[in-house]
């Protein structure tokens, strides 16, 4: 294995990431406002902005899902048990002792086992839950005549809020983990430039130099 500076995050992945950040923060802010947690926005504008941001992020997720499957990038998010205990131990204990991160990022696997499992859970369970409850909540006028509709809309609203808190917790933990190890800037820079230092096999290095030389930088 040789350490090389390689473009591991293409433009769309970076655009998707930062657009998602902006939209999720907007949704959390407007959602909390519409629930009375703060008074920075009146109820009407908060709901309108929340709905617009929701449609925008839903469209972004549809395009991102298409991109993930057409490029094969979805494989990066399949969790593996191997190495997960070591990574979990590092974040729970080793990081406070100054230990080295046990996972070495490689070309075809840029997410460590714990990251992959977390993203898998978000993409397959948490995000669909927020979509489904949000759509049901938004379209309540179309099904308000069903039996016990007021009970079900309360269930939907609370599930939507609970899922939003799960996403908010993920954001807080995600930002916190960016501060451990090599430091905040070192973690964020690859998602801005696209380049990160990873381990390449001789075969991968030879392939990139011959077919995609622009993806390798000298520094």
Image: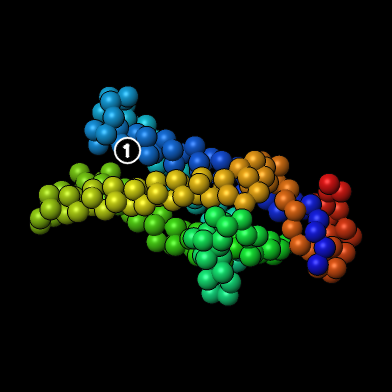
- In x, y percent, where is residue 181? 62, 51
Give the farthest residue toward the bottom: 82
Instruction: Tell me which residue sits at (81%, 67%) in the image.
Output: 1
Q: What's the residue at 71%, 42% (across, down)?
A: 193
Residue 154 located left or right of residue 181: left
Horizontal and vertical percent for residue 8?
Answer: 71, 54
Q: Which type of secondary structure does the marked residue at label 1 adopt?
A: helix
> Is residue 95 at least partly visible in the picture?
yes
Question: What residue lies at 24% left-to-right and 33% top-to-bottom?
Answer: 36
Residue 122 image point, x, y percent? 44, 58
Count of numbered tags: 1
Colouring scheme applied when the structure was drawn: rainbow
Residue 175, image x and y in percent?
51, 45
Q: Answer with left or right where residue 107 lies relative to residue 191.
A: right
Q: Residues within 10 Å of mark 1 (few under 14, many from 20)?
A: many
Residue at the farthest front position? 97
Compare residues 118 and 46 and report the one nearer the observer: 118
Give the vertical position of 171 relative to 32 (above or below). below
Q: Residue at x 37, y 31 (%)?
A: 49
Question: Could you tell me if residue 128 is visible in this image?
Answer: no
Residue under circle 1?
A: 31
């Amino acid at each position: 294995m040789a350490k090389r500076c390689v473009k591991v995050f293409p433009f769309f992945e970076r655009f998707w990431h930062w657009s998602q950040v902006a939209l999720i923060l907007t949704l959390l802010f407007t959602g909390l406002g519409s629930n009375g947690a703060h008074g920075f926005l009146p109820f009407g504008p908060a709901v309108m902005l929340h709905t617009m941001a929701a449609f925008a992020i839903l469209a972004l997720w549809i395009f991102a899902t298409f991109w993930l499957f057409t490029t094969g990038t979805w494989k990066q998010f399949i969790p593996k048990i191997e190495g997960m205990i070591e990574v979990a131990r590092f974040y729970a204990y080793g990081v406070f002792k100054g230990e080295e991160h046990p996972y070495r990022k490689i070309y075809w696997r840029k997410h460590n086992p714990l990251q992959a499992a977390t993203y898998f859970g978000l993409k397959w369970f948490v995000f669909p839950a927020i979509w489904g409850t949000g759509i049901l909540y938004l379209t309540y006028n179309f099904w308000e005549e069903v039996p016990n509709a007021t009970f079900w809309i309360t269930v939907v609203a609370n599930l939507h809020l609970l899922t939003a808190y799960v996403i908010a917790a993920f954001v807080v933990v995600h930002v916190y983990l960016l501060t451990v190890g090599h430091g905040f800037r070192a973690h964020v820079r690859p998602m801005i430039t696209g380049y990160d230092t990873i381990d390449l096999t001789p075969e991968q290095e030879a392939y990139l130099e011959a077919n995609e030389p622009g993806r390798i930088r000298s520094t």
